[in-house]
């Protein structure tokens, strides 16, 4: 086989394997195991050594043992619930092989009378006789049984024996692939080949040997393939030529002057980075990353303004209607009347919608705000020059690439995220984009004081709220996340609203997932205008919403949230100039571990530190729902324990980028490890 057919074999269908039928294939497909390569990552948990045989006389009951016996007599009672039996002997004694639910013909075939058969399994004892119930390991060929059999966490319907058979078959036929790594990289892993590394990985004695060369090499392969794909996408997008925008700095600065705050140094810096991209003749594909409250919105709106002044339209997409509306209101406020701004909402009336769609097509509208609705097929622009996507941490590489394609060549792309994630993850998830980071928060910010309280001390909390309200402040009350069911979340919010409304008549608002859109707008407006003091809500306020006058947030059932999510929720306050407070409420006393976690939140307001801790506790897939994002989950590599491998991969990738090395030798690596559609047009 040449190299190409080698890796093609690994990507081939499971039915190419001997003894694997449609039934097994379908069971595996349910577990997202679609081809031979996928099966390589189904690792043994441990093994059972069946290589030593005993004599019947020496058998121990309850233990897995192997014996070689001769079947002497069948007993097929043909009575319901009575099993079929085969009486077998060796020179030291007698044992029954007992079969529930197996047919006579099958039993006669696997245990023919008078032949020597090696069987293995857990030994039982029944009515003064040894027995083996439903034996799975048996063969006339003793060598097939007398070996180490791996134990797997099993897919329903597939026996361990079948797994062993399949995987042994794959390992035996494992193709030898041409090496893709440079000599220098290979040296770091004692020059172990991919082929040898896979074999070692499946050796049951190596379970958990994370530090060994085979494991490290394979983890590195995985990281590196991701980086390589990211880098290729980035290069590809950057090569796209576009009409450069001409930035009118004077107009921009006029807007900045009129703001009721001055921009931070980082805001100026990131704005300049974005402006440079806008005015370049290469397409922008940039991520603006900044902790909650670092002031990303204004930076992006200024970029939108500059694009409009250069004769282009802008689309700004937010994850929720509420947030889209807030951005829209802000834009209305800070931009002069000469710019046409619209909001497209799921609830817009048909006639209104038609007017908006026409306006976009005729270039009567300059900036459109909305949720993903703005990327529907029927929405067409005359001259789209910039797409801004806010808080889309659930967008995977594929979706971003599609988005960038959709806008057309002249369309720049700016993504924003408030999810401060460890660098290893940024490199993995956003390696296809250029990066602008807002580290500094506005100077006026005061740290948020964070407390934890037991639920039965709610009276203290109420007292505290009264005091704050008397000072003219506003309060978010976030209701407990009861479970995945929105219904229950909703009813608990209603109850809390009634409870608080009793104590603070006509001062409490309620917002939950079921509130109608128009009503939502109304509620948020009333809260924004400070007509009401308390906003009771479910977690729908989590992303992005900005109410500078609210400076207290109460979070019930805080133990249901991860650290990063608590940080996001807490970030709803502390956005104005006042001192702010976050109270985390708990149902019962905290465990030591939970206390440790909460202390991290109390000690720091730095999202990067918090997300790193969160990741240590919950694993990276869980931070703010990346799991649902389709973002690649590593099979072996671990962003916490393999930091060195991530750094090594980054360095190697830069080397390749700078030297402009031909990457075709990495083709099998990419094809095998990263089968996203996007690479079809790369490799
Ligand atoms: P995020 O980065 O979380 O999206 P926002 O853009 O919503 O943050 O900004 C949070 C709040 O801070 C808003 O009320 C905004 O008006 C305000 N803000 C933004 N930049 C500054 C600044 N340089 N100085 C003071 N307040 C600012
Ligand atoms: Mg925001």
Image (cartoon, helix red, strand yellow):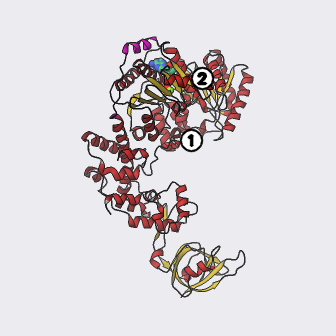
- Residue at 63% in and 20% down: 527
Q: Is residue 252 magenta?
A: yes
Compared across the picture, whether 341 is left or right of 652 comes to right
Residue at image position (45%, 38%) is: 402
Apparent side of residue 30 relative to residue 586 in the rendered image (left or right): left
Residue position for label 1: 592
Observer-nearest residue: 278 or 612? 278
- Tell whether 231 sits left or right of 585: left
In three-dimensional space, the C-alpha distance between marks 1 and 2, rounded to whole angstroms, equals 56 Å
Which circle marks residue 274 in the picture?
Answer: none
Q: How many marks?
A: 2
Labels 1, 2: front one = 2
Q: Which residues are magenta?
A: 238-258
Question: Looking at the picture, how far across and down is residue 256, in whole percent?
Answer: 43, 14
SS category of the residue bearing label 1:
helix
Instruction: Please tell me whether residue 388 is drawn above or below residue 640 in the rendered image.
Output: above
Crowd around label 2: few <14 · some 14–19 · many ≥20 (10 Å)? few
| Frontmost residue, 600 versus 179 | 179
- Residue 445 visible? The answer is no
Which picture quadrant has residue 75? bottom right
Q: Residues within 10 Å of mark 1 (few under 14, many from 20)?
A: few
Q: Is residue 399 above or below residue 390?
A: below
x and y, in percent, of residue 418 in the image: 48, 31
| Quadrant holding the N terminus | bottom left
Residue 501 appears in the rendering: yes
Location of residue 548 in the rendering, given as x and y in whole percent from the top left corner:
55, 19
Identify the disc placed on residue 352.
2
């Amino acid at each position: 086989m040449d190299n190409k057919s080698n890796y093609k074999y690994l990507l081939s269908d499971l039915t190419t394997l001997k003894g694997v039928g449609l039934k097994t294939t379908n069971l595996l497909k349910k577990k997202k195991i679609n081809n031979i390569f996928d099966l390589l990552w189904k690792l043994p948990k441990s093994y059972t050594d069946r290589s030593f045989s005993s004599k019947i006389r020496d058998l121990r009951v309850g233990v897995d043992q192997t014996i070689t016996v001769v079947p002497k007599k069948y007993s097929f009672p043909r009575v319901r619930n009575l099993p079929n039996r085969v009486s077998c002997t060796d020179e030291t004694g007698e044992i029954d092989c007992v079969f529930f639910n197996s047919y006579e013909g099958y039993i006669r075939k696997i245990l023919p009378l008078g032949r020597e058969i090696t069987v293995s399994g857990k030994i039982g004892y029944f009515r003064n006789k040894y027995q083996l119930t439903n034996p799975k390991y048996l063969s006339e060929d003793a060598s097939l049984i007398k070996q180490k059999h791996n134990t797997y966490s099993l897919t329903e319907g597939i026996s361990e024996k079948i797994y062993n058979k399949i995987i042994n078959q794959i390992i035996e036929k494992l193709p030898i692939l041409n090496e893709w790594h440079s000599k220098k990289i290979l040296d770091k892993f004692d020059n172990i080949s991919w082929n040898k590394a896979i074999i070692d990985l499946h050796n049951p004695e190596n379970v958990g040997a994370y530090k060994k060369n085979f494991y490290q090499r394979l983890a590195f392969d995985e990281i590196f393939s991701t980086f390589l794909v990211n880098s290729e996408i980035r290069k590809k997008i950057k090569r796209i030529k576009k009409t450069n925008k001409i930035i009118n700095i004077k107009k921009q600065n006029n807007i900045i002057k009129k703001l009721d705050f001055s921009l931070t140094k980082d805001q100026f810096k990131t704005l300049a980075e974005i402006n440079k991209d806008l005015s370049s003749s290469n397409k922008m594909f940039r991520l603006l990353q900044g902790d909650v409250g670092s002031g990303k919105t204004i930076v992006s709106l200024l970029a939108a303004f500059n694009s409009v002044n250069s004769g282009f339209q802008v689309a700004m997409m937010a994850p929720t209607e509420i947030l889209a509306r807030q951005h829209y209101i802000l834009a209305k406020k800070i931009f002069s009347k000469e710019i046409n701004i619209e909001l497209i909402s799921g609830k817009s009336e048909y006639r209104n919608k038609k007017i908006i769609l026409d306006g976009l097509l005729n270039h009567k509208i300059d900036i459109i705000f909305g949720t993903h609705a703005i990327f529907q097929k029927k929405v067409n622009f005359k001259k789209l020059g910039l797409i801004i996507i806010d808080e889309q941490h659930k967008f995977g590489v594929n979706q971003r690439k599609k988005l960038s394609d959709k806008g057309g060549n002249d369309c720049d792309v700016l993504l924003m995220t408030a999810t401060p994630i460890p660098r290893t993850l940024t490199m993995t998830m956003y390696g296809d984009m250029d990066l602008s980071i807002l580290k500094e928060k506005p100077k006026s910010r005061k740290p948020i004081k964070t407390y934890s309280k037991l639920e039965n001390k709610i009276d203290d909390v109420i007292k505290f709220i009264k005091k704050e309200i008397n000072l003219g402040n506003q309060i978010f009350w976030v209701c407990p996340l009861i479970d995945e069911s929105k219904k229950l979340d909703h009813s608990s919010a209603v109850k809390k609203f009634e409870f608080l409304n009793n104590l603070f008549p006509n001062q409490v608002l309620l917002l939950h997932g079921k509130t109608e859109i128009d009503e939502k707008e109304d509620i948020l407006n009333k809260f924004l205008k400070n007509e009401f003091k308390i906003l009771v809500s479910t977690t729908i306020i989590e992303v992005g919403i900005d109410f500078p006058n609210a400076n207290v947030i109460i979070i019930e059932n805080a133990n249901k949230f991860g650290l990063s999510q608590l940080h996001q929720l807490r970030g709803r306050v502390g956005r104005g100039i006042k001192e702010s407070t976050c109270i985390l409420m708990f149902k019962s006393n905290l465990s030591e571990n939970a206390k440790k976690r909460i202390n991290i939140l109390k000690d720091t307001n730095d999202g990067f530190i918090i997300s790193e801790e969160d990741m240590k506790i919950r694993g990276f897939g869980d931070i703010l729902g990346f799991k649902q994002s389709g973002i690649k989950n590593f099979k072996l590599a671990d962003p916490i324990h393999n930091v060195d491998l991530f750094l090594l991969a980054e360095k190697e990738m830069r080397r390749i980028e700078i030297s402009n090395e031909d990457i075709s030798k990495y083709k099998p690596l990419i094809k095998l490890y990263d089968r996203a559609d996007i690479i079809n047009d790369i490799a």
